[in-house]
Amino acid sequence: MLKEMESWARKAGRLQMDNFQKNIEIDSKDRKIDLVTEVDKKSEKILVDKISTAYPDHSIMAEEGSNKSNDSRYCWIIDPLDGTVNYVHGFPIFAISLALYKDDQPEYGLVYLPYFDDFYVAQRGQGSYYNGKRIHVDEDYTVKDGIIATGFPYSHQESNESLELFNKILPEAGGIRRTGAAAYDLCQVASGVFSGFWEIELNLWDIAAGILLIEEAGGVITDFKGKTLRMDSEQVVAGNKQVNYRLREILNK
Ligand code: IPD
Ligand code: CA
Ligand code: CA
Ligand code: CA
């Protein structure tokens, strides 16, 4: 299964690299700063066509709207291009996130970074891997001395919520990073580069693969209350057990 998923991601990734830093069609969604490009849509079509051919009975949930609701225990969750704003501006952190859920639980997860040709993959019960090498969350650093990543939802111009949370964490953190691609942030937590992550207003397609990558790397990923993430959860806190706990303590202050 993962090999198959890798080959689909490679095909969409090739399209993304062929069009990277080129003149492409860019539109806005409801907010002017929430961009979607022809590359987001074409990447989604590549992935959805491949999945529909290989698994015609499975359901699909994809960011750009190619949804398919079948009476199936299996559902593919797709973010065809995570980090669209980075992509549009020519910043190379962008990813394809692909997950297969069975009975509302992630079974397989893959995040592919076309610019770096980097794969992060996980299968339930089989661990998480970065380009074939087993990865683990960081067990040594704490919030106080580690790097904590976050992201800001597109509502940041009309809501202060992200800023308020940021103001709580910054004085307590060793360092903060904002890469602009939530799926990638979660990979960095899974591989122990970032010690933790939090964000609000995320969608399942941003985190579906990342949830499994973190869990299979020995990490904990929950909502701000510490509850297991559901299909419709929007708040996310991740790290090792202690970092997840401490971040929630600070965020809920
Ligand atoms: C966005 C990115 C970003 C995060 C936003 C997401 P998109 O996804 O993951 O890092 O802060 O909340 O919406 O729109 O680039 O796929
Ligand atoms: Ca988007
Ligand atoms: Ca996304
Ligand atoms: Ca996207």
Image (cartoon, rainbow, N blue to C red):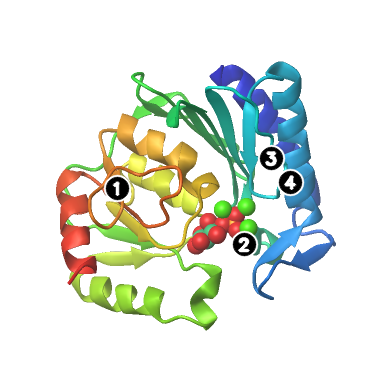
Residue at the farthest front position: 71
- Mark 3 lies on a secondary structure that is loop
Q: Can you identify the residue that label 2 sits on? A: 86
Label located before the other in sequence (2 or 3) = 3
In screen coordinates, is 165 left or right of 18?
left
Q: Please tell me in which quadrant of the rendered image residue 147 appears.
A: bottom left
Q: Label 4 amino acid?
A: Gln
Are circles 3 and 4 on residues that touch, CB within 8 Å? no
Residue 133: x, y in percent? 40, 26
Q: Which mark is residue 33?
A: none
Residue 235's x, y, as percent? Answer: 37, 57
Spatial CA distance of label 1 from label 3 is 26 Å
Residue 93, x across and y down, in percent: 57, 54
Residue named by callout 4: 16
The label shown at residue 67 is 3
Question: Is ligand 1 within 8 Å of the beta carbon of the residue shown at mark 2?
Answer: yes
What amino acid type should be assigned to the residue bearing mark 3? Asn
What amino acid does circle 1 point to? Answer: Thr
Upstream in sequence: badge 4 or badge 2: 4
Q: CA distance from mark 4 to mark 1?
A: 31 Å
- Ligand 2 location (quadrant): bottom right
